[in-house]
């Protein structure tokens, strides 16, 4: 692995692998969290608009060029960041990378393209809301928080999307798409000096500096049970617990805990909620440690008549977790091995490696957090019990049912 800092402040991180493919990811801290003073959805709309045209290419020419060289490419706006990424044959790296640099450095934000794309975004919003699991999470965040950006969808809502202007998107782009706010990662078999020279040729003369980001203030979740009707067969349940006060070691202890609590068919959640009580087909838990999100969540799909039993079963699972024999000989080692395997499998795909490295550098200022599973944090049974007591209390619980 090799890292470079370009003269204009761009961070480049490279990994050499034996493959005929090259993957790369270009990212900015320019997600929905930066929308203070902008309409919700502006960050996502900018992501769409940079593909509409550049000073040298029309949208059709961009699309044709991408199809010719990329086996896979995409872009994504999250609350903390926006990323642009793709995989292509290594022999086509220069051409493919120049396509993306042109899109990101020379967008023209055409007026006719703006009106077209806002219609597309409204359709995307409709599709988003047809997913009941996603809708349950969205309603939970809206009910659990009144101040944080995560209470609104990344994409925005009907009203905010209607208020977005082309001038606003240009202002957002100019404010946050800056050289000192950019991270690029590449996985390739090509010579890394050649990669650096190619990246520097495309991005090296671009210099636009962003002022320092303000520290986020994390609002505590509102405890309680919230019910909303939705277009769903049965019922969706989601619990959330804030983890914004945890240290990085405590986050790792939470990952150790969750291997036993909510991941896999041998987990406590699966064993109790699905196997023993037959209350759900889908059940699991997840850690969302992204900047500005910081939540531990539990998700259950059940029937309307089993809602109360499902909530009670989660309480039973937490009791079992507290009574679990974390001190058993070999327990911590087995968890560590499972965690390392899951993370290594995820990072084995070059494009996932690029996305993870880029986003960790953007969110935490250190890409090495992508490989925390390789770091010896000396997690003990005491650490796990402490994090259970710190996290698993005062949940916000969302019920989505017909």
Image (cartoon, rainbow, N blue to C red):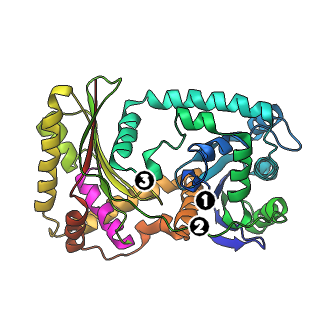
Within-10-Å neighbours for mark 2: few <14, some 14–19, many 20+: few
The secondary structure type at the circle numbered 1 is: loop
Which corner quadrant of the image does residue 353 belong to?
bottom right
In the rendered structure, find residue 29 and report the number of the disc placed on it: 1
Of labels 3 and 2, earlier in sequence is 3
In the rendered structure, find residue 213 and report the number of the disc placed on it: 2
Within-10-Å neighbours for mark 1: few <14, some 14–19, many 20+: many
Left or right, 334 with respect to 21, comes to left
With respect to residue 345, does 337 lie above or below? Answer: below
Nearer the observer: mark 3 or 2; the answer is: 3
Quadrant including the C terminus: top left
Residue 206 seen in the figure: yes
Nearer the observer: mark 3 or 1; the answer is: 3
The residue range painted magenta reads 248-263
Picture coordinates of residue 267, whole percent (x, y): 22, 49
The secondary structure type at the circle numbered 3 is: loop
Q: Look at the numbered discs 1 and 2 and tell me whether their residues touch, using CB distance below 8 Å.
A: yes
Of labels 1 and 2, earlier in sequence is 1
Which corner quadrant of the image does residue 250 belong to?
bottom left
């Amino acid at each position: 692995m090799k890292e470079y800092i370009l003269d204009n402040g761009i961070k480049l991180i490279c990994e050499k692998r034996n493959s005929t493919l090259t993957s790369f990811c270009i990212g900015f801290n320019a997600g929905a969290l930066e929308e203070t003073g902008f309409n919700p959805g502006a960050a996502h709309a900018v992501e769409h608009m940079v593909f509409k045209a550049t000073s040298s290419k029309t949208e059709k020419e961009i699309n044709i060029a991408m199809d010719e060289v990329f086996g896979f490419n995409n872009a994504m706006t999250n609350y903390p960041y926006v990323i642009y990424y793709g995989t292509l044959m290594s022999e086509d790296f220069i051409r493919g990378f120049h396509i993306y640099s042109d899109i990101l450095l020379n967008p023209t934000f055409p007026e006719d393209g703006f009106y077209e794309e806002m219609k597309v975004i409204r359709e995307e919003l409709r599709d988003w809301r047809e997913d009941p699991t996603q809708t349950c999470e969205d309603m939970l965040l809206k009910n659990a928080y009144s101040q944080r950006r995560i209470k609104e969808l990344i994409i925005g809502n009907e009203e905010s999307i209607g208020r977005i202007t082309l001038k606003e998107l240009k202002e957002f782009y100019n404010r946050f798409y800056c050289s000192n706010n950019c991270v690029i990662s590449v996985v390739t078999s090509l010579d890394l000096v050649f990669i650096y020279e190619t990246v520097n040729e495309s991005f090296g003369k671009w210099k636009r500096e962003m002022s320092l980001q303000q520290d986020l203030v994390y609002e505590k979740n509102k405890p309680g049970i919230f019910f909303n009707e939705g277009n769903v067969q049965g019922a969706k349940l989601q619990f959330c617990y804030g983890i914004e006060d945890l240290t990085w070691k405590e986050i790792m202890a939470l990952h150790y805990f969750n291997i036993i609590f909510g991941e896999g068919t041998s987990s406590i959640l699966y064993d109790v909620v699905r196997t023993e009580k037959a209350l759900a087909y889908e059940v699991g838990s997840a850690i969302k440690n992204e900047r500005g999100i910081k939540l531990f969540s539990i998700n259950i799909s059940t029937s309307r008549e089993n809602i109360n039993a499902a909530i009670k079963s989660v309480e039973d699972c937490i009791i079992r977790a507290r009574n679990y024999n974390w001190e058993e000989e070999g327990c911590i080692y087995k968890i560590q091995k499972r965690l390392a395997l899951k993370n290594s499998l995820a990072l084995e795909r070059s494009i996932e490696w690029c996305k993870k490295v880029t986003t960790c550098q953007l969110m935490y200022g250190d890409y090495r957090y992508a490989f925390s599973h390789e770091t010896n944090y000396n997690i003990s049974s005491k650490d796990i019990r402490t994090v259970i007591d710190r996290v698993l209390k005062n949940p916000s619980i969302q019920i989505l049912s017909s």
